[in-house]
Image (tube, rainbow, N blue to C red):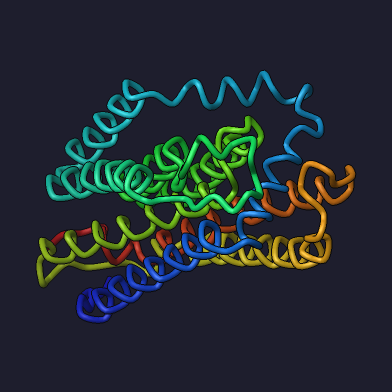
Amino acid sequence: MRVTPRGGTAVWLVLLALVQTAAFIVVWRFALYTDVGQWIDTVALTGNRIGRDHIEDPVDRILNAMSVVSLLAATVTIGFIALIRGRVALAVAATLLIAGANVTTQLLKYGLARPDYGIDPERAYVGNSLPSGHTTVAASVAVALVLVLPPKGRAFAAVVGAAYAAVAGVATLSAGWHRPSDAVAAFLVVGVWAALAGLLLLITQREQAKVSSADAHRGVALLLGLGGLLAIAGCALALSWLVGQRTTAPAELPRHPLFVGYAGSAAGIAGTMGVVMALVLSAVHRIVPRHKG
């Protein structure tokens, strides 16, 4: 056990918040305000019809399970876990993370405009859908659960939570509810709020708080991070090939390019969640030390 150096952790959390905010801005500007960004989103969304009959029922079950009632129940449960561990500040921070991420998503969704470039006339009336509310719900609950659980349960929760949030994000694409950029943006919103919640916990942390290196779960964090980066790289390769077909309207593309757009976007969604969760897991042992002091 050793004393936790709070200064370095605080700088790291601020950096994470800034980087993820910058990444959100890049995704927002590219997906909404460029022809190629809107075209890629539309191709991926059009490609969701491939194999839809085989996955429609499980996709509907996953998405319909996410409601205001289920979000409130999950928030209360997560807060209760923190309280029975004697961590009042942790309960407040986890609740703030969930509430802040979901409120931010709704404000952005209705506050941002999506220009109509004539690329997706079928959905032009819908307007902006970035970020995805359902994806934010899944990711915020998953990240908050990792924060409040004891060290022994964090690694398992991180893997299961990241998988659950990634499946939820891909499910919104498969159901035709959201474009891939919506899910990616939602994960980044949650990542920013996770960093802010971590800063709040550092402020309330005592100077003599101690941390064990055994609680770092570096192997699992590395697995999630590298897996996420590889998935994002695969997405980048798929979409770079797809851009060569941009002279064709999405609705007129054959099956192969549509599948590449859909599968590549799904990989990007899953990869983003893997990286966000890896960053959370790599820092949580310092933010929520085993012994408060």
Identify the image quadrant of residue 138.
top left
Q: Is residue 263 left or right of residue 106?
A: right
* Residue 67 x/y as whole percent: 39, 23
> In the rendered image of this protein, does residue 54 appear above or below residue 194?
above
Q: What residue is at 61 percent from the left and 55 percent from the top?
A: 38
- Judge by depth and name the residue closer to the eye, 228 or 30: 30
Q: Quadrant of the N terminus?
A: bottom left
Q: Is residue 124 visible?
A: yes
Q: What residue is at 64 percent from the left and 35 percent from the top?
A: 122
Q: Is residue 154 left or right of residue 5?
A: right
> In the rendered image of this protein, does residue 257 appear above or below residue 53?
below
Q: How many marks?
A: 0
* Residue 111 x/y as whole percent: 32, 48
- Judge by depth and name the residue closer to the eye, 8 or 104: 104
Q: Quadrant of the C terminus?
A: bottom left
Q: Is residue 149 visible?
A: no
- Judge by depth and name the residue closer to the eye, 248 or 139: 248
Q: What residue is at 51 percent from the left and 42 percent from the top?
A: 165
Q: What residue is at 30 percent from the left and 56 percent from the top?
A: 193
* Residue 253 x/y as whole percent: 85, 47
Identify the image quadrant of residue 204.
bottom left
* Residue 272 x/y as whole percent: 55, 58
Q: Is residue 186 left or right of residue 194?
A: right
